[in-house]
Amino acid sequence: MTQVSMTVNGKTVSRDVEPRTLLVQFLREHLGLTGTHVGCDTSQCGACVVHVDGRSVKSCTILAAMANGSQVTTIEGLANGDTLHPMQEAFRDNHALQCGFCTPGMIMSAVDLVNRNPNPSEETIRHELEGNICRCTGYHNIVKAVQAGAQAMK
Amino acid sequence: MYEFNYHRPTSLAEASKLLAGAADGKFVAGGQTLLPTLKQRLAAPSDLIDLGGIAELQGIKVDGGSVSIGAGTRHGVVAKSAEVAKAIPALAKLAGGIGDAQVRNMGTIGGSLANNDPAADYPAAVLGLNATIHTNKRTIAADDYFKGMFETALEDGEIIVKVTFPIPKRAGYVKFPNPASRYVMVGAMVAETASGIRVAINGAAPCVFRHKEMEAALAKSFSADALKGIKTDPKTMNNDIHASAEYRAHLVGVIAKRAVLAAG
């Protein structure tokens, strides 16, 4: 076992885990934060995207131990009480989801994208979302939502 | 994943010592290849030694004639570096096209080069730009580094510290990604360097290679037209479910021409 400590959505947490524990397992199974999804488990689909020290990463492809000492933000950490984050609101307004399985990862990727690039073009958004797969919407409304979310985040 | 012990050293010396003391240890950098490999139980190291905590592996330095990139520098950092974009735009572009945004936020140049996946991007940059690989033991010229599919000149326990790219007069990188996986099916780094024209082809064959016939043609005339009629032997190409050897051989010509145009 190895001790892992990190700040998750503003709260300091510490657990003894097996070294092979993935960050997504740490979040879902040890902390009960099931908003972060496991889709493909092969680092392709992006349903598991969270932020580690402000960078979006696939939490199925990083060990919890590698994130020791980091600041982690999950989908649960975006809203301010009952007020959704502007990117969450934009996804709702633009009907950017159907089944919703990919949505937590899409939103976490989109927020990181806009943090790095406050005025993304449609082309940039499509390139930056290459690591997130949605099997329902066909991406069109997701791209619209990210554009709207980028404006709302200003 | 099988069980393993995890270590996070803060110096190269400590990392080497940990590896020497492990029954079957493995270094991990960004983990974007190794972790999926472990999850599929295709590898079972006794110990994983994480190089992510070693400060001397980080950072980018640009001086008059070269760009040095620490082995632990993530692709996203290289892609967004204004200094790299100014000195070697083709290198910044290459880094910004690796995997996806999340992979670029974890994956490192040292990890990519130590792994030497035939479909990786960085090997084309290192070979095409005539870079030098600095390890904790020696320096290795690009021409001596790539040995075959997933094979390099690195010895057991040798750690890449940094990679130095001489700034070329001009360079262009273009790849044809697999439409589903986005891995390189065929890529080309074409560069006019102080030591002549270099054409490195990745994705197409088991290992990145220099296309000497194209280099000779471009040395006479640096233009896409100069590559007309130059054939690539399909016998040297990969042949798999993604593309036949003949198709890849054809793509080498197409992509190399585009890379020449990208070099300007």
Image (cartoon, coloured by chain):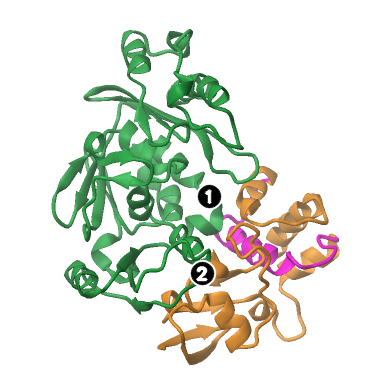
Please say whether residue A46 is visible from this viewpoint: yes
Instruction: Give the residue drawn at x 75%, y 76%.
Output: A84
Q: Residue type at mark 2?
A: Gly
Q: Colour of chain B?
A: green
Q: Tell me residue B107's x, y (percent).
A: 44, 57
Q: Quadrant of residue B213?
A: top left
Q: Tell me residue A54's x, y (percent).
A: 51, 69
Q: Which mark is residue A147?
A: none
Please report, as a chain letter, where disc 1 is located: B
Q: Tell me residue A56's x, y (percent).
A: 55, 65
**Which-is-in-front pick, marks 2 and 1?**
1
Q: Quadrant of residue B156?
A: bottom left
Residue B92 lies, with reference to residue B8, above or below; the image says: above
Q: Is residue B188 left or right of residue B167?
A: right
Sort mark 2 into few (<14), some (14-19) or many (20+) by Cα contacts within 10 Å.
some
Quick one: which chain is orange? A
Q: Is residue B45 left or right of residue B106?
A: left
Residue A104 lies, with reference to residue B143, above or below; the image says: below
Q: Is residue A147 magenta?
A: no
Q: Which residues are magenta?
A: A95-121
Q: Residue type at mark 1?
A: Gly
Asked if badge 2 and badge 1 are on a common chain, one would say: no
Which part of the image, by quadrant, shows the C terminus of chain B? Answer: top left
Instruction: Give the residue drawn at x 64%, y 39%.
Output: B179
Q: Tell me residue B187's x, y (percent).
A: 48, 32
**Label 1 sits on residue:** B99
**Label 2 sits on residue:** A54
Instruction: Give the residue drawn at x 25%, y 52%.
Output: B162
Element class at badge 2: loop
Q: CA distance from mark 2 to mark 1?
A: 19 Å
Sort mark 1 into few (<14), some (14-19) or many (20+) by Cα contacts within 10 Å.
many
Which one is nearer the viewer's eye here, B152 or B255?
B152
